[in-house]
Structures are given as C-alpha cells and as structure tokens.
Image (cartoon, rainbow, N blue to C red):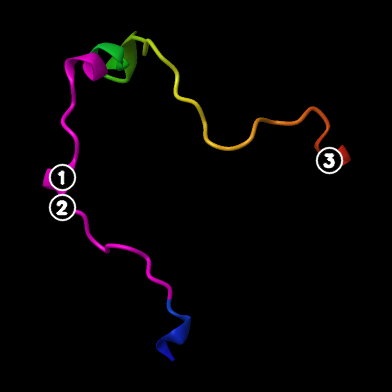
Amino acid sequence: MTANRHDSGPGWVDPDDAPEFTDEMFDRAEVTIGGEVVRAASVTVKRAGQPNHADPKSM
C-alpha cells in the first residue's frame, strides 16, 4: 500500500538554516508602531501566478 505515497520532501527544516536579514531588507520594510504605519514599505511584493485577464470567460 505504500506504492501511492509521494515523497513530500523533508518534513522538518532546521530554523538555524534560515537566511540572515540584511540591512537592505530592514531599510525596505514597513515600520508599524501600535498597528499604525510609521513608514510604508519602499517596494511591493509581486503575487505569484498569471495576471488577471480582461475577459476570463473568453479564454
């Protein structure tokens, strides 16, 4: 019955392997104090996937 099992990769990743934050990352970050935005982020994050189509039903 194990023939249908798919390898899902490593089940656990060591948190010490996470990349270090750089000063550039902190400079681009949004700063909030008490839920109020003090400084907006200097860049935007692009969403993954295809862009929206003007008329999706015609595709």
Q: Which residue is mark 1?
A: 17
User: At 19% across and 41% down in the image, what residue appears?
Assistant: 18
* Amino acid at the residue labelled 3: Met
Crowd class of label 3 (few under 14; some 14 to 19; many from 20; radius 10 Å): few
Crowd class of label 2 (few under 14; some 14 to 19; many from 20; radius 10 Å): few
Pick the front one: 8 or 15: 8
* Amino acid at the residue labelled 1: Asp
SS class of the residue under badge 3? Answer: loop
CA distance for labels 3 and 1 = 43 Å
Asked if residue 12 is among those painted magenta in the image, a careful observer would answer: yes
Rendering coords of residue 33 (x, y %) = 25, 16
User: At 44% across and 91% down in the image, what residue appears?
Assistant: 1
Q: Which residue is mark 2?
A: 14
Q: Which residue is mark 3?
A: 59
Query: Which tag, 2 or 3, sits closer to the chain's start?
Result: 2
- Are the residues flagged by discs 1 and 2 in contact, CB closer than 8 Å? yes
